Image (cartoon, helix red, strand yellow):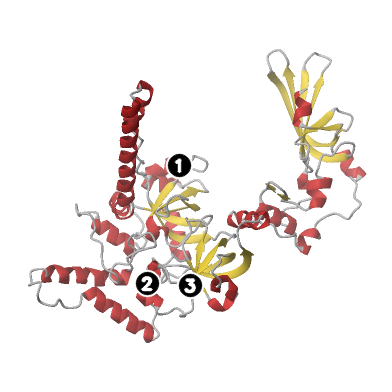
Amino acid sequence: MDHPTPLPVPASDQLAADGAHSRRRPRKLRSGGGDTSRDGRSTHGPASSQAAASGSAHQKKGSRRSRKKKPEPAAANIANIAETANIAAGRLPPAIYAAYYDASQLAEGFASGQLVRGVFRTSPKSRSDAYVSLDETPSAEAVRRYPLLADCDVGSGNDVYVCGDIDRNRAINGDVVAIRILNKAQSRASYRMHRIGDDRHHDRLRAQRRARLEHMASKLNSDSTSSLGTEADPKPKVPELFGAVVAILCPNDNRCFTGTIATDAPSVVKRHPAYAITLDPETLWFKPLNQALPLMALAASDVPRHLYASKSKRHCTVRLLRWDACAPVPTAGFVSDLGKRGSLDIETRLILEENGVCAEPFSPAVLRCLPQAPWSIPAREIRRRTDLRRACIFTIDPPTARDLDDAVSCETLPNGNVLIGVHIADVSYFVRPGTALDLEARRRATTTYMVQKAIPMLPAMLCENLCSLNPGVNRLAFSVMWEMDPSSATVLSTWFGRTVINSACKLSYDDAQL
């Protein structure tokens, strides 16, 4: 069977594939020929890799010369000078990351099974590790090409591993991305380039830990503790399925991040002189609190001076605007000053901002979707539903809860069986699909409970009133009822339906335990 024409392979992947045939660890290139990311790992660009190759050859050839003779400039440094001249002439710096696939390439890739899609996330422990959880079942053609994809179906808990900055290709947490599965040679080369150093470091830490435990056990001379020194910590398992991001299909809506601002350029920028020369001399640098995120460039004109001129460290919020293929770090825009850390209000705002929790008031468009107050259930709606207002239904929640969204009931039937009911507030009656209220509820996803307050998913009129199963008032609900045998707890029959209920009382957890 003839296969479709392979999609273009980014230059960084081609370099990795070529390096996989060498038994030696890839040599670390000098600045300009082989750039490095914030964590010190290689981030070769298509143009700079050629210069690096020629520079390496030149250095090898000249290594036989006398050390007393002054060496000639390396080709990599000459390449840096050439790149700087290109910038001065108005040309763009060389690309660090591969260009994203266009619409036709994506369509061809998905149709042929060369590409799959999923939600991207970076490990909070190491920016070298990222994962993509598939958000749709891979096609039969994709599984035929890559059989391991069968174990990565939606909800399986198995992900596609993305190793290093280059393969991550500017994606951030929550982005829906298209990924290309790497072959074994590319996977080995990518892992060797980005992760072997970290693995060796963790191996040393494990060995040191075992040595300390053995030393403690020998001092205590205890059988119970001597076994601690012999326990072998499990080594990190090398993932089986590697992928590379080739496009961001749907960027994460929440691109606001919390952190601090510095005036000194980070080392990752200094290692890219062709990019650094394009920046304004007064560019500021944002350092996110979340270590899984990259540093970001900020325009000084957008940031209040007291944020970076003062010696006291203040926190702020920025929004990621763009990340060009020729830039080692993204560009961000200033949003707000959060102030100094320490107070409960500032710490709460930092937590909310860092976790993408929207605490802003609901917009007028959302509030216009609410029913007019005072509101009561229309008689026509009551006739369409099963009336359970006479049933003994009650809620069980913390004593301070204000949004009572579920209730239970238990009734003994004439035949000796019991009828167990669970009743959930029917929010769908008020939240119509596609409305501003629906879109806002999707964005917030849930009510967030802090120590001193709650950030609601829905306006207070719904979550604390009309959709709260308060005692003594009629409420719309969706119910499920089970008839059960009390002696064996066997479910004999099940019923689902829309109902009208009237809660008899509000119980706390302590009340329910009596």
Reading the image, the residue beneath label 1 is: 158
Nearer to the camera, 286 or 333? 286
Reading the image, the residue beneath label 3 is: 263
For disc 3, the neighbor class at 10 Å (few under 14, some 14 to 19, many from 20) is some
Residue flagged by tag 3: what amino acid is it?
Thr
- 246 left or right, relative to 318: left
Q: Position of residue 279 (x, y in %)?
A: 45, 78
Residue flagged by tag 2: what amino acid is it?
Lys
Nearer to the camera, 183 or 104? 183
Q: Against 295, is 123 above or below? A: above
Q: Against 192, is 506 above or below? A: above
Q: Position of residue 100 (x, y in %)?
A: 44, 65
Which numbered disc, 1 or 3, marks the residue that appears first in the sequence?
1
**Residue shown at 87%/31% (left/top)?**
504
Single out the mark in the foreground, 1 or 3: 3
Q: Position of residue 301 (x, y in %)?
A: 56, 79
Look at the numbered disc 2 and give the secondary structure of its residue.
helix
For disc 1, the neighbor class at 10 Å (few under 14, some 14 to 19, many from 20) is some
Reading the image, the residue beneath label 2 is: 270
Nearer to the camera, 16 or 74? 74
